[in-house]
Image: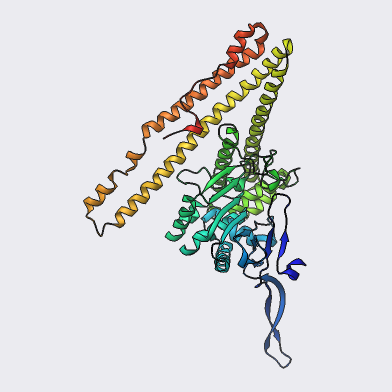
Amino acid sequence: MPLKEKGYAEYNFGDGVKTVYLQPDKTLHTEKVVTNIQVPKVNGGYETQSYITDTYQKGLLTDEKAGYNSYFVTDKPTVKDSKETYFVTRGSDGISMENLNDWVSNNARFTLFNSYIPQAKLAEKAMEAKIKELPKGATMNVTGHSLGTMVSIQAVANLPAGDIDKIGRVVLFQGPDARESINKMSKQARENIEKLEAQGKIDYYVSPFDIVSMLNRNKKGVDEIGNVHYLMPISGTNTLQTDALHGSSHDFGQYQFNKDGSIKEANVKDNPEIFEAGIRVSRLIDETMAQIVKKAPQIAGSATLTAVLTSMVAVSGRVDIAKIVAASGGKLTKEQAMELYDTFMKKYNGIIKDTEISMKRNSEISNLKSSISTSTGGQKVKLRAELAGVVAEEAKSYGREYNELVKNCQQETEDEIDQIVREVYDGAHGSAIYLSYYEVEELIQSFEKDRLWDNSQAADNLKEAKKYKEKLDKFSSALKDVSKNIQTYDGAAGKSLFNEKPKTVLEPWNLHF
């Protein structure tokens, strides 16, 4: 094995990508699980006999018993010569009795209680140790997928303040937002994340169709961590459709890439349907959890709640409803489980289907425009009629998407204002030992929310968004009429009508509050 022969494993990912080196975990060893049994002695009485009943791997970067595994990678064969290093943490295995350490001890604790999870504590110790090995001027980049994102961000947050300057970038894939869990930690943890955010060093790459990616996102009162990039999915699969051609929406196989090899991102102007899908999936998760608790109040705030939600997506269909009942510990009846499953899957798959249709329409519009530019006579008129019909449907969808995005953008901005106000208030009152009450009040007066946030303007924005949606609905109806009767219109007049665009003072990608 190269790792044993050279002291590292060399990986070359092809042209234009630098070679990296996987460094060994020299602390890795086999731990024995010893079971003590009381057995009768020949002359009476009992004695304790010990047996090795199991073994597992343990080290700085691995703890099989805890389900934890990270990797340390460098840009040079040795750590002492490296300038950039990488701390990589794996996600969870598929849910099973063997992998409950991933799901119950870590995923469930994070989902339900925003806890500082056990695997993150192991990762934090490992990061500290690896940062100590770095030569002067070297940095450590951090990355992970799924559960690995929760482990990574919590571990980075809890590093000593002096280690944060050694962090290069934190790039996380298909993971939930962790702001609420960080807010429950120490002041230093919050400051670490805020410092990295201010430097633009934290990036999340998420799929709008993926339940894990959308967990804790688009929530009222929560400012999501870092720069969140919505991916352009290849196809419309849900989180656990692992047998799909390109994998599930939780897999790397669903990523679209640009010609230069970079990940293709959605943007609000050209792909509003992608962001709307993410908002809808986020809300569906919260709505479904609330419905589960409503039907079985006794499982609120327990790992059972996550198990039920997971099983609802994981089962192969209504024939497996018994698995949902089992996941609830018998707290749900078969009828309740079936109702929850049917409602969830109908809405979840409906969101994906709506988005697929909208994406397909965008492609059709592009192809029709191209065909019109090279056609003549009756064929051009026919293609214009077809294009008008497709655009009519897209206009209606765009109005709905626009309305959702305005509301979501506005909520995010208000959340940020609330956070600033809280920080100013806490900071000012922390100075109360040096200033009088009136001096403190005067200090924070200009930072009161009413001075920073205009509720009247916010209400006007939402009214304008609604009016814009209504305009697009009318525009859609007009275009449908045009598409049916375009051949009776004068060519020039028809063209003029078709090219007319609705006017609005608002665009969700240019909103200012």
- The residue positioned 49% from the left and 54% from the top of the image is 196
Q: Is residue 138 above or below residue 265?
A: below
Q: Is residue 153 above or below residue 33?
A: above
Most distant residue in the right direction: 1
Quadrant assignment for the N terminus: bottom right
Is there any visible trace of residue 303 in the rendered image? Answer: no
Q: How is the image coloured?
A: rainbow
Foreground: 214 or 267? 267
Q: Is residue 52 above or below residue 266?
A: below
Quadrant assignment for the C terminus: top left
Most distant residue in the bottom direction: 43
Residue 302 % position (x, y): 55, 56
Is there any visible trace of residue 200 in the rendered image? Answer: yes
Foreground: 204 or 83? 83
Q: Is residue 193 left or right of residue 447?
A: right
Residue 80 % position (x, y): 61, 67
**Picture mark count:** 0
Residue 70 % position (x, y): 64, 62
Quarter assignment of residue 4: bottom right
- The residue positioned 68% from the left and 63% from the top of the image is 22
Foreground: 31 or 84? 84
Foreground: 3 or 502? 3
Residue 309 % position (x, y): 61, 49
